[in-house]
Image (cartoon, rainbow, N blue to C red):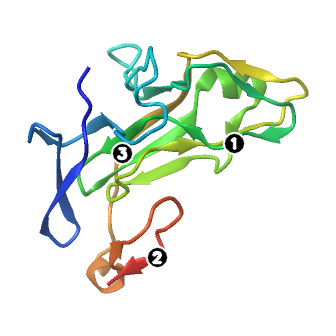
């Protein structure tokens, strides 16, 4: 299996073209986070849609072991081993897997994860289990799903938008302009 790194070429303000190690342009999709602790795990599964009409790409438990979500707690940070790649006018919305939410009321710690186009690092999850019993997610099972979405901007966007991202998770307000 080939490992990919995410290289970024600045074309103009707020536009980034992402390429893999072979120089192939990636407009939308996922690449392995080369420096991830789980990227080399045996049985690692890249995100994929379950059916041709599925809106979401399943994100899998690639840790190599079962994840036990203790009753009434929030998990530690869960590594997905992947980086999302998308156009500058898109974001990836991440939701807990439908079955876990419906059966157990499990949810992401931040309800819906929003992965911006300029977040070029590994995606991590934290899942809350409000249920009164533990939830076990076996290795290799889908844990969450991501849906690529477009977004719109306001007419005065050029006057209100901040600078470039300077950090990782939770760094939207930490920009250089």
Q: Percent position (x, y) of residue 15?
A: 18, 63
Name the disc covering residue 149, or none: 3
N-terminal-most mark, 2 or 1: 1
| C-alpha span from label 1 to label 3 | 27 Å
Residue at (27, 56) in percent of width and height? 89
Residue 142 image offset from top left, x and y in percent: 54, 21
Label at residue 174: 2
Q: Secondary structure at mark 3?
A: strand
Q: Earlier in the sequence, mark 1 or mark 3?
A: 1
Residue bearing the label numbered 1: 76
Residue 19 lies in quadrant: top left
Task: Using the rendered view, name the quadrant where residue 27 is placed.
Answer: top left
Dot in front, 2 or 1: 1
Kind of element beneath mark 2: loop
Whether residue 73 sits left or right of residue 35 in the image: it is right
Instruction: State the image coordinates of residue 23 (x, y, percent, origin top left).
Output: 8, 42
């Amino acid at each position: 299996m080939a490992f990919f790194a995410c290289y970024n070429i600045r074309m103009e303000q707020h536009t980034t073209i992402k390429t893999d190690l072979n120089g192939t342009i990636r407009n939308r999709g996922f690449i392995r986070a080369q420096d991830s602790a789980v990227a080399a795990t045996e049985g690692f599964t890249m995100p994929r849609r379950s059916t041709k009409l599925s809106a979401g790409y399943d994100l899998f438990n690639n840790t190599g072991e079962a994840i036990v979500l203790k009753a009434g707690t929030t998990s530690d940070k869960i590594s997905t081993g992947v980086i999302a790649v998308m156009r500058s006018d898109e974001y990836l919305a991440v939701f807990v897997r439908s079955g876990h939410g419906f059966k157990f009321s499990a949810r992401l710690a931040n309800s819906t994860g929003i992965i911006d186009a300029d977040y070029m690092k590994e995606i991590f999850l934290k899942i809350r289990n409000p249920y009164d019993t533990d939830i076990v997610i076996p290795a290799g099972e889908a844990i969450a799903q991501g849906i690529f979405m477009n977004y719109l901007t306001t007419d005065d966007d050029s006057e209100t938008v901040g600078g470039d991202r300077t950090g990782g998770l939770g760094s939207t307000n930490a920009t250089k302009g």
